[in-house]
Amino acid sequence: MTKATDLAALRDEIIAKNITPELAKQAQNLVMGDGSLDAQIVFIGEAPGKNEDIQGLPFVGAAGKFLNEMLASVGLSRDDVYVTNIVKYRPPNNRDPLPDEKAAFWPYLARQINIIQPKIIITLGRHGMEYFLPDFKISDVHGQPKRVIFGDGKIVILPLFHPAAALYNGGLRQTLIDDFLKVPQVLEQIK
């Protein structure tokens, strides 16, 4: 079995088990993820938006363009990392994913991470962060790497604000850029 076949089987299982049927019914695509299956860094957002639902790929709208710019600022591209969301179907009208929707997808996200085996998980926004760092607020811990127990071992979580939040709130934009510039250093420290 390869990582690609394992991820394809995971995708098929989500569809076969009809995870979040209300979301699945109104979505165009199940958006699993995109990027290198051997990535050292996995980015986790909240849920696909309109463009992501249409293309079947995560972070392809304005927030995705901003993410790509930040990756380039640290010498990385989408081909170097893996990008996904906790919820794999677009919520109606781009609303926040509901707690039960996140809970339904959490076991699949955990398996997705176990298949890829990254060194670091970068959560984008509070929805991606809350399962790894449930007792923290993103406004308090953004840009601060945390080592947490995950699966059979430990993994480093780097919580960042969501790129979309930075696009809508100019004050967060520089904060997110500054936090993002820490990524190479954090990665170097855990090698």
Image (spheres, rainbow, N blue to C red):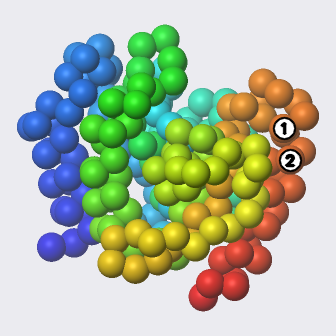
Q: Which mark is residue 187?
A: none
Relative to 40, 5 lies left or right:
left
Q: Residue at x 83, y 27 (%)?
A: 169
Depth order, front residue of 184/80: 184
| Cα distance between the residues tagged 1 and 2 | 5 Å
| In the image, residue 65 above or below residue 96 | below
| In the image, residue 31 above or below residue 13 | above
Q: Which image quarter: residue 28?
A: top left
Relative to 5, 97 lies left or right:
right
Q: Secondary structure at mark 1?
A: helix
User: Is residue 69 visible to us here?
Assistant: no
Mark 2 highlights which residue?
A: 175
Mark 1 highlights which residue?
A: 172
Q: Amino acid at mark 1?
A: Leu
Q: Position of residue 178 (x, y in %)?
A: 86, 56
Relative to 69, 39 lies left or right:
left
Q: Say few, some or many: other residues with alpha carbon within 10 Å of mark 2 (under 14 / 14 to 19 / 20 or more).
A: some
Q: Residue at x 28, y 51 (%)?
A: 107
Q: Residue at x 58, y 73 (%)?
A: 147
Relative to 189, 152 lies left or right:
left
Q: Residue furthest front?
A: 135
Q: Position of residue 95 (x, y in %)?
A: 51, 18
Q: Say few, some or many: other residues with alpha carbon within 10 Å of mark 1 (under 14 / 14 to 19 / 20 or more).
A: some
Q: Amino acid at mark 2?
A: Thr
Q: Secondary structure at mark 2?
A: helix
